[in-house]
Image (spheres, helix red, strand yellow):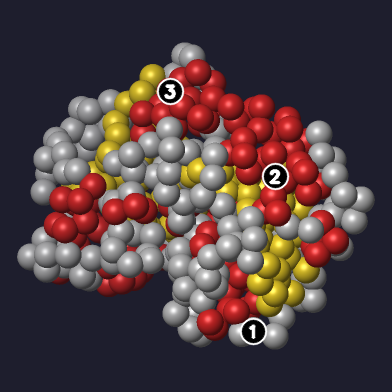
């Protein structure tokens, strides 16, 4: 295979591909949109320089890296991002998720082994001398969070997925492309060079790599790993606050006081209480009994604009997940933060987007938060966000 021009892959929430493309092409006008699938887009970069010279700057990308090529299990020819190879059917998000559960497709051992053999053979040509510190094997986003049944962020892994990951890892280790002591899909430390293997279709992979530069790049596909919970999560907010704290690198410590506006039914509060924090939930609606009865939880049954400032004086962290327009939420926070005793270390704000055109106001929102004395302000569409984004700010 002849060398191909450099390509950048970017992962995102399914349904946000057009916005990611427009945002990136505005950032790098000489780039060109290339191959895409729900939850993943690629760009042909303007020169042969390393792809990471064009790091996406928006809030919608999950993770990114240098894309080598695509491979399929049923053909010898390797397809570049520009489309020179064979292509299978373009499956939509739901059809892809359903297909992966069919044991006759990806779950069948011959399919997995052919795919692994094709990947190893292709890497020998596309990156003949490369070795990697870690391996991330992941599935492009099959369904948008709003479409998931239950509280999980994505469809369940296909039958045979763990065998596929383990066999691919063993094949790469046998060729000394990957250290023998490394486990695939482990959180990668900053600075590691990681091989990316993304399942595009049941018989098609995208191969790439990235150097870990951001917290989200430590996770396979930019998706924070799920962990077992002691008790069932009350709501999706449980996962959102955990992800926001992990991605934001926030230093929440036992005994600190957290205040959340829009706390019902209590998912975020549940996770915060598990971290041994004191929590005040502000919401006129009912709170789940397992949170409401916790000795370190206080429920203020009112709206954010009705709360007495002295009731939340000395809070360390101020959160908002209220189902209200962004400007209304920011107005409420601005009013609370005028009080000299309401000066939290940081903010975790969910901004609802009934219309994605509201993202045009992102810079205005961050400038307003900066005017309150917060120096570091970042945004991200979390894995557990639906049509909303998370803003994290610290002093």
Secondary structure under the numbered disc 2 in the rendered image: helix
For the point 56% across and 52% down, which residue is it? Answer: 322
Label 1, label 2: how many angstroms apart (C-alpha)? Answer: 27 Å
Q: Give the residue at mark 3.
A: 22
Which residue is identified by label 2? 332
Q: Quadrant of residue 280?
A: bottom right
Nearest to viewer (mark 1 / mark 2): 2
Give the class, few, some or many, for how many residues have Cα within 10 Å of label 1's Cα (few <14, many ≥20): few
Q: Residue placed at 58% from the left, 63% from the top?
A: 284
Residue 43 numbered mark, or none: none
| Residue 65, position as x, y percentages in the image | 48, 40
- Separation of residues labelled 1 and 3 (CA atoms): 46 Å
Q: CA distance from mark 2 to mark 3?
A: 32 Å
Query: Which tag, 2 or 3, sits closer to the chain's start?
Result: 3
Q: Nearer the viewer, mark 2 or mark 3?
A: 2
- Vertical order, 242 against 66 (above or below): below
Q: Position of residue 142 (x, y in %)?
A: 28, 51
- Residue hosting label 1: 294
Q: Residue at position x 36%, y 23% from top?
A: 33
Q: Can residue 167 be seen here?
A: no
Crowding at dot 3, Cα within 10 Å, few <14 / some 14-19 / many 20+, comes out as few
Callout 3 secondary element:
helix
The residue furthest left is: 104
């Amino acid at each position: 295979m002849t060398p191909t021009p450099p390509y950048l892959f970017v992962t995102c929430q399914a349904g946000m591909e057009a916005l990611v493309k427009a945002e990136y092409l505005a950032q790098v006008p000489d780039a060109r949109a290339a191959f895409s699938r729900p939850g993943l887009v690629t760009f042909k970069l303007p020169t042969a320089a390393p792809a990471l010279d064009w790091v996406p700057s928006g809030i919608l990308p999950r993770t990114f890296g240098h894309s080598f090529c695509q491979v399929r299990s049923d053909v010898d020819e390797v397809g570049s991002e520009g489309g020179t190879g064979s292509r299978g059917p373009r499956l939509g998000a739901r059809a892809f998720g359903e297909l992966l559960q069919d044991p006759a497709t990806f779950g069948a051992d011959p399919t997995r082994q052919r795919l692994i053999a094709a990947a190893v053979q292709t890497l020998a040509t596309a990156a003949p001398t490369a070795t990697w510190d870690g391996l991330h094997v992941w599935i492009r986003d099959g369904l948008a969070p709003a479409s998931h049944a239950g509280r999980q962020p994505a469809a369940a892994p296909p039958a045979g997925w763990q065998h596929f990951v383990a066999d691919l890892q063993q094949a790469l280790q046998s060729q000394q492309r990957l250290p023998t002591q490394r486990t695939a899909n482990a959180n990668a430390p900053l600075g590691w060079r990681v091989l990316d293997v993304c399942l595009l279709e049941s018989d098609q992979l995208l191969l790439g790599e990235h150097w870990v530069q951001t917290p989200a790049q430590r996770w396979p596909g930019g998706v924070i790993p799920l962990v077992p919970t002691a008790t069932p999560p009350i709501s999706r907010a449980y996962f959102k606050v955990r992800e926001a704290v992990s991605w934001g690198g926030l230093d929440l410590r036992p005994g600190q006081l957290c205040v959340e506006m829009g706390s019902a039914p209590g998912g975020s509060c549940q996770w915060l209480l598990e971290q041994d924090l004191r929590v005040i939930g502000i919401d006129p609606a009912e709170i789940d009994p397992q949170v409401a009865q916790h000795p370190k939880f206080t429920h203020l049954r009112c709206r954010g604009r009705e709360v007495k400032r002295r009731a939340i004086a000395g809070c360390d962290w101020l959160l908002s997940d209220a189902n209200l327009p962004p400007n209304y939420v920011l107005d409420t926070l601005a009013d609370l933060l005028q009080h000299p005793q309401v000066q939290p270390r940081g903010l975790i704000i969910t901004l609802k987007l009934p219309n994605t055109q509201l993202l045009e106001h992102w810079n205005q929102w961050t400038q307003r938060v900066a005017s309150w004395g917060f120096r570091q302000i970042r945004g991200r569409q979390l894995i557990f966000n639906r049509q909303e984004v998370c803003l994290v700010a610290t002093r």
